Image (cartoon, rainbow, N blue to C red):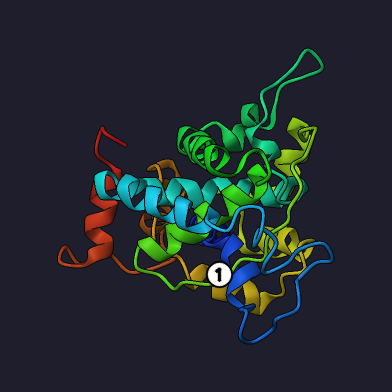
Amino acid sequence: MAKATSFTAFLLMSSLFLSSYFSVSKADNPAPIVSGLSWTFYKTSCPKVESIIRKQLQKVFKKDIGQAAGLLRLHFHDCFVQGCDASVLLDGSASGPSEQDAPPNLTLRGFEIINDLRARVHKECGRVVSCADIVALAARDSVYLSGGPDYDVPLGRRDGLSFATRNATLQNLPAPFANATAILSSLATKNFDPTDVVALSGGHTIGISHCSSFTAAFTLLKIPPWIKPLPKTSSMFVLQQILQTPRC
């Protein structure tokens, strides 16, 4: 029965990193979240950075709104490993594979979009805006342009010069098949309490997932005495049938 909670892990994936921002707004708390960040960090050096990013993402999402979820997940996987330092963008070296090569990151997407945004920002302002801030702003705009709330993002992050190891990446990202106990334990290291985890699970709004993320949970539906047989008219029954098709 514990495996059924793997569905909770899926719900977390696209929304975990929103919590860092939704509880803070310029109106409610004008102070920076972390020393070194500021609501007006690029006011003189690159005042148009946010408008440049949002304007371009409007064009990107008009063609493919699915890219929004990819950018949101990219930010999550960056922040949860060794902080929001854009280290997930770094290529590997002779010393070892990059974060991109770790199993949880093999399906990350949106790198080309971030590279394009960076080029546009650098063309306007020079190389003054960090990649970490560009990724954070792109994640915020992905939420807003998908129909979610808009929120202010304090800026001033520094780009990391090194990437995390494969093991560090695995240890810091909750597995999609993790049960509730494992998820709570993992997120407790990020200062999330059970209430935060419930809110984040329910806050899932966009994104896709592969059938493997659901199969284990729905397989349990066929093992008595967990539940009674599903009526063929129920949405759960329909989903179960989809997961049993060859395309999964």
Identify the residue at horizontal 26%, vertical 34% (top origin). 247
Q: Would residue 246 be seen by someone viewing this image from the given angle? A: yes
Please tell me which residue lies in front, 49 or 179: 49
The residue beneath circle 1 is 200
Q: Position of residue 226 (x, y in %)?
A: 44, 66
Q: Is residue 230 visible?
A: no
Q: Residue furthest left?
A: 233
**Image quadrant of residue 148?**
bottom left
Determine the residue located farthest toward the bottom in the rendered image: 28
Q: Amino acid at mark 1?
A: Leu
Say which residue appears at 70% left-offset and 81% top-offset: 30
What is the total number of numbered labels drawn onto the structure image? Answer: 1
Please tell me how crowded label 1 is: few (under 14), some (14-19), or many (20+) other residues with Cα within 10 Å. Answer: many
Would you say 197 lies left or right of 61 here? Answer: right
Q: Nearer the viewer, residue 169 or 181?
A: 169
Position of residue 175 in the picture relative to residue 31 (left or right): left
In percent of width and height, residue 133 lies at: 64, 51
Q: Quadrant of the C terminus?
A: top left
